[in-house]
Image (tube, grey):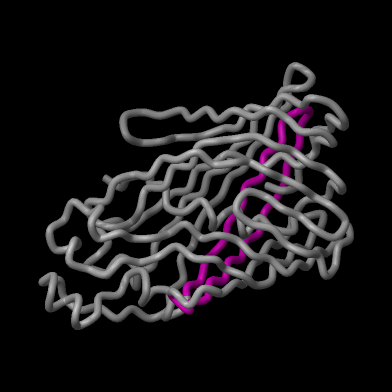
Amino acid sequence: MTKLKLLALGVLIATSAGVAHAEGKFSLGAGVGVVEHPYKDYDTDVYPVPVINYEGDNFWFRGLGGGYYLWNDATDKLSITAYWSPLYFKAKDSGDHQMRHLDDRKSTMMAGLSYAHFTQYGYLRTTLAGDTLDNSNGIVWDMAWLYRYTNGGLTVTPGIGVQWNSENQNEYYYGVSRKESARSGLRGYNPNDSWSPYLELSASYNFLGDWSVYGTARYTRLSDEVTDSPMVDKSWTGLILPGSPTNSDNASFQGILCIKTGRHALFCITVVQYLGGNNATKNDSI
């Protein structure tokens, strides 16, 4: 049976760049980051994550990423963006004897361009970014089409998308070199570039006046170039994380709530109470 997994918080945060309409809004809070890696016998990471969101006329910052608008109007938004990608591998943390003889893979800072185009039928969201720290020297391109539905205090945004990883990106995180193969006994592996389709669903709900909940989930079908790696034992991954409210003029209090069954996280939400300012429910960052 396929398991729903948590992969990398930075991916969805980064590809949400440049989508908020609200201007001059700021919110502050805290949440919990959960990253379950695609690697064999690798434990889930759980750590606190600051939630800092700002949306201005020229600059924006959300989660693990931020950017500067080159173009910003109601229809089109183009940004220079940078974000932290938390995907990594530490050989000593693996429970697999062979995997413990591999080289480490580091998390990295990605930078590039993000673009969003809004229509009455939904909106296009895309980000093209590359490694800036000379770790993978890889490139990631994410593109999705989403449609926002609002009914009273409830907003639901389903979407479908695809993520492209360059050959360098896959080689660094999923390849096995000759030296690693000789040390570990794993077969050598040199992946090419890859396309991984995904489904995404974001939701927000405003209730009791100043209280709102936000959540985002993504389910990704990994490419064969990734699943064929001897480092990987999963064919599907999922991403579940709190949303990013950007509609409060003042700081807000946030808490994270995850509904779980066994080891499988089904959905996570952020609970928000606004401390003052604009309490509009519109949230176009998800």
Q: Is residue 156 magenta?
A: yes
The correct choice, above or below, for 141 with respect to 192 in the image is above
Residue 217: x percent and y percent? 53, 44
Q: Residue at x 62, y 61 (%)?
A: 144
Q: Is residue 254 magenta?
A: no
**Which quarter of the rendered picture does the N terminus lie within?**
top left
Q: Nearer the viewer, residue 128 or 29?
A: 29
Residue 215: x percent and y percent? 59, 37
Q: What is the span of residues highlighted in magenta in the rendered image?
A: 136-165
The correct choice, above or below, for 3 with respect to 179 in the image is above
Q: Is residue 29 left or right of residue 176?
A: right
The correct choice, above or below, for 170 with respect to 151 in the image is below
Label the magenta part by its dominant secondary structure. Answer: strand
Q: Nearer the viewer, residue 17 or 222?
A: 17
Q: Is residue 65 left or right of residue 265?
A: right
Q: Nearer the viewer, residue 244 or 249?
A: 249
Residue 60: x percent and y percent? 76, 55
Q: Nearer the viewer, residue 183 or 207?
A: 183
How many badges with numbers are in the image?
Answer: 0
Q: Is residue 175 left or right of residue 205?
A: left
Residue 2: x percent and y percent? 30, 47
Q: Residue at x 35, y 66 (%)?
A: 105
Residue 80 falls in image quadrant: bottom right
Residue 221 falls in image quadrant: bottom left
Q: Residue at x 63, y 27 (%)?
A: 271
Residue 223 falls in image quadrant: bottom left
